[in-house]
Image (cartoon, rainbow, N blue to C red):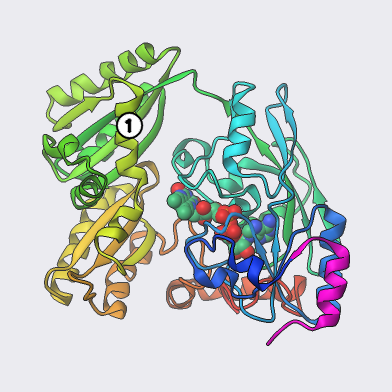
Amino acid sequence: MTLSDEFLGALEDLCPVRGKEAVAALDPGFYPDNLAAGVAAHPRTVSEIQAIVELCRTHRVSIVPHGGRTGLAGAAASMPGQLIVDLKAMNRIEKVDVVSGTVRVQAGATLQSVQDECASHGLTPGIDIAARGSATIGGMISTNAGGMEAFRCGVMRHRVLGLEAVLPDGSVFSDLTCVTKANEGLDIKHLLIGAEGRLGIVTRAVLKLEQLPLATSTVLTSFENAAGAVAAFHNLRAAGNLLRAEIMWRSYAESVAKDVGLDDLIASFDGNVFVLFEHEGATQQDAQTVQEDVLIPLIEDGTISYAIVAQNDRQASDFWRIREDSWAVERQRPGGYWYDVSVPLEGLDQYVGELENDLKNIAANVHLSCMGHLGDGNLHVTVAGSDGVHPDKELVDHAVLSRLRLKGGSFSAEHGIGLEKMKALAAYGDPAKLRFARAIKQAIDPESLMNPGKVQS
Ligand SMILES: Cc1cc2nc3c(=O)[nH]c(=O)nc-3n(C[C@H](O)[C@H](O)[C@H](O)COP(=O)(O)OP(=O)(O)OC[C@H]3O[C@@H](n4cnc5c(N)ncnc54)[C@H](O)[C@@H]3O)c2cc1C
């Protein structure tokens, strides 16, 4: 199916448009199908978005909103006959309110640009993900992104004070409050947060800010198991100044270290689990002292097997590279299966142990790799076979996902549902919750104009 010349002509009168060749030159992100629609509109204002929505309604053309295309669940995939509405031209940081501790931004601003602008005022949006250079605030709101600071500052849902969006009927939802307390009945903006572009196009947001740490210190630690890592996490958190706690099982750390040439760095660590802890302080030396004060007793009592405090920025960035270059796992064993789950902290070892056993029963030589955000029990799990021969996907899906609900965890921690987890949502989602979600979609977007075919249709 292709878009009619009449539609395309009218669209070109409204805003800049990219056709097939120009779209093909864009970076599709992780899903080549993100650009399959072959036509992208690049609105510059809210009224241009309203006009695009009106035009799409008239011509019954469905819309796939795009931010940085860094989403990992396939929620931005499109197909011929649809229109990509790319928000990246709407990238202004409109106001940093230092006194109130808020920032108002357009949806297409990247996280990095917001972080940089806020940092110049000694503030931070209180959320960070490795895709910061490309991920947009609108995309992060629409996927309810989590990341490395969620255990302290919450996920995107907790960072958003105010929101503006163009709804499927072309009207503007405008709730740009700048305060934490606005108890004015149902807080409807939360329907748009995590909606994966299915209830409207987010155009602006007001985010809550935190004080930017003055200086940080990073330490790479290892533990016999996750229980030890969790005990240390609670201790360090209670002592204060803890900013980040990122967990990696040995098989993950070894795969990445090998790929990026940092094998020597982790060679001296014992134990099955690594954790990167980051602390803040008035100066780097101060942060390091705070860190050492809390770590030394844990090393002495054997909770921590081994630790290296980064002595300079270069070493800290090598530590972080092992955590953040997760795509190295794919480079090492292409075509593996990726999952994003969460598990209550007390059950981490049991979950990973049961999974290892299940995988052994499914096939020989299966490589399991786990890492994630320790404070949230959020694990990014990859399962791959050797030499490109992967185990049966349905059996692996079952092994990874089936126990989570009973344990009180989730089959979808922070990346959303998109296309990737629709089957899992049908299998493990609560039926009443799904009925509720369908009723909301039907009420707000009865013609299914916005991002149809994703999440639950
Ligand atoms: C290296 C890497 C690390 C990551 N780390 C994390 C992490 O730690 N935590 C985490 O939670 N996620 C992480 N992610 C995934 C994360 O979901 C995305 O990076 C980010 O939230 C998506 O933003 P985006 O602008 O790229 O959105 P896109 O990928 O463009 O879109 C994602 C979804 O949002 C919709 N959308 C986009 N913009 C709008 C808008 N303005 N209005 C309405 N709908 C819109 C799209 O239709 C789609 O459904 C990571 C991704 C990568 C590549």
Q: Is residue 415 left or right of residue 232?
A: right
> Observer-nearest residue: 114 or 370?
114
- The reply to whether residue 191 is visible in this rendering is no
Residue 309 visible here: yes
| Image location (x, y in percent) of residue 337 | 32, 68
In magenta stretch: residue 204: no
> Is 275 positioned to the left or the right of 98 in the image?
left
Q: Residue at x 21, y 76 (%)?
A: 389
Q: Residue 162 vs residue 196: left or right?
A: right
The quadrant in which the N terminus is found is: bottom right
The amino acid at mark 1 is Phe
Q: Quadrant of ligand 1?
A: bottom right
Q: Is residue 59 shown above or below 14?
A: below
Tell me the quarter of the image containing the C terminus: bottom right
The location of residue 281, given as percent across then percent down, is 42, 16
User: In this rendering, is residue 249 above or below 10?
Assistant: above
Q: Nearer the viewer, residue 193 or 350?
A: 193
* Element assignment for label 1: strand
> Residue lying furthest front in this view?
21
* Label 1 sits on residue: 277
Between residues 49 and 124, which one lies in front from this camera angle? Answer: 49
- Stretch in magenta: 1-17
Specify whether residue 5 is painted magenta: yes
Q: Quadrant of residue 387?
A: bottom left
Image coordinates for residue 280, horizontal then vertical, percent: 42, 21
